[in-house]
Image (cartoon, rainbow, N blue to C red):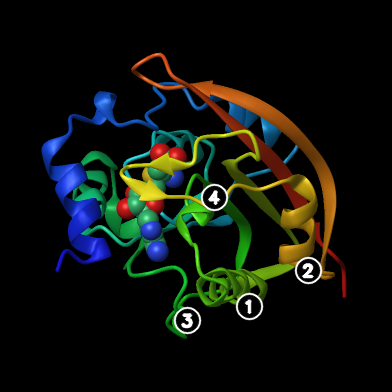
Amino acid sequence: MNTLQEHWNKIFKETPEEKLGWYESEVTQTIRFLDGVNFENKLVFLPGAGTSRLVDGLIENGAILILNDISNEALTALRKRVGNPEKHYWYCGDISKPLPKEIPAVDIWIDRAVLHFLIEDKEINGYFENLNRIVKTNGYVLLAEFSLNGAQKCAGLNVHRYSADELIERVGCNFKLLKSEEYVYVNPSGGERPYIYTLFKRNGA
Ligand SMILES: C[S@@+](CC[C@H](N)C(=O)[O-])C[C@H]1O[C@@H](n2cnc3c(N)ncnc32)[C@H](O)[C@@H]1O
C-alpha cells in the first residue's frame, strides 16, 4: 500500500517545482500577512515546508528555521537549494505525531497548506499539541488553510476546510487572534484556491 510519505515523495520526485498545485514564485501574501513580525535571529518552525520559496525569504530576513516535512524528497531538494543548510534544523516526520524532544521551543510557527491535509480528529489534535508545546510565550502562529468555500481535494487527497472560527477553537485559549483574512490564491494552472489566513499571538506568562 502507498504510504503517505510515498505519496508525497512521488509528487515531489515527478513534478517540476513550478508545476506543483500550490507553487508560489513570490510569497508576498504570507510575508505581508506577517507584517510587523521581526524574523532576525528568530527560530521559525515550518511544518510541511515542502520546497516553498518562503524558506528563502525567511532566511534573507535573518530567521533560523526548523524545516519539517513528511517527504524526504522535498527536504532533500530544499537542503540542496538553501545556503548553509547546517545553520537550520531538519526534521522529516509526520507533524500529527509527537515531535522529538530535541526540537527546541520556537518564536514563530508558519503553516501554509499543511494542516488541512489532516482529516482525523486524532491527527488534528496531535498537530495542535505539537504547536502548543513548542511555540514560546508571545510567539506567533500563522495558519493559512483552504477555506470553507475552497477545494475539497489537493494533491489527490481529501482536505479538511477551515473557517477562522474553527482555527480559533482548535488553536485554543493560549492564543489570541490578531487578524484573519480570506485570500484567493491562483495556482499554476490558473485555478482559484480560496484560503483563510489567520495570525495568532501566544499570551504572555
Ligand atoms: C500543499 S504542500 C504545501 C508546501 C508548503 N507549505 C508551501 O506552501 O509551498 C503540503 C506539504 O505538506 C507536507 N505534508 C503533508 N502531510 C504532512 C504531515 N502529516 N506531516 C508533515 N508534512 C506533511 C507535504 O509533503 C507537502 O510538502
Q: Earlier in the sequence, mark 3 or mark 4?
A: 3
**Which residue is more in the foreground, 26 or 80?**
26
Q: Secondary structure at mark 1?
A: helix
Between the C-alphas of marks 3 and 2, the distance is 18 Å
From this viewpoint, is residue 55 visible? no
> Could you classify mark 3 by the number of other residues whose Cα lies within 10 Å: few (under 14), some (14-19), or many (20 or more)?
some
Q: Between tags 3 and 1, which lies in front?
A: 3
Between the C-alphas of marks 3 and 1, the distance is 10 Å
Q: Which mark is residue 133?
A: 1
**What residue would you read off at disc 2?**
172
> Could you classify mark 4 by the number of other residues whose Cα lies within 10 Å: few (under 14), some (14-19), or many (20 or more)?
some
Residue labelled 4 has its Cβ within 8 Å of some atom of ligand 1? yes
Q: Secondary structure at mark 2?
A: loop
Q: Earlier in the sequence, mark 1 or mark 2?
A: 1
Q: Which mark is residue 56?
A: none
Q: Percent x, y for residue 49?
A: 40, 49
Q: Quadrant of residue 7?
A: bottom left
Q: Amino acid at mark 1?
A: Arg
Which quarter of the image is occupied by the C terminus? bottom right
**What residue would you read off at disc 3?**
98
Between the C-alphas of marks 2 and 4, the distance is 16 Å
Residue labelled 2 has its Cβ within 8 Å of some atom of ligand 1? no
**What residue would you read off at disc 4?**
111
Between the C-alphas of marks 1 and 2, the distance is 12 Å
Q: Earlier in the sequence, mark 3 or mark 2?
A: 3
Tell whether label 4 touches label 1 (CB within 8 Å).
no
Q: Secondary structure at mark 4?
A: strand
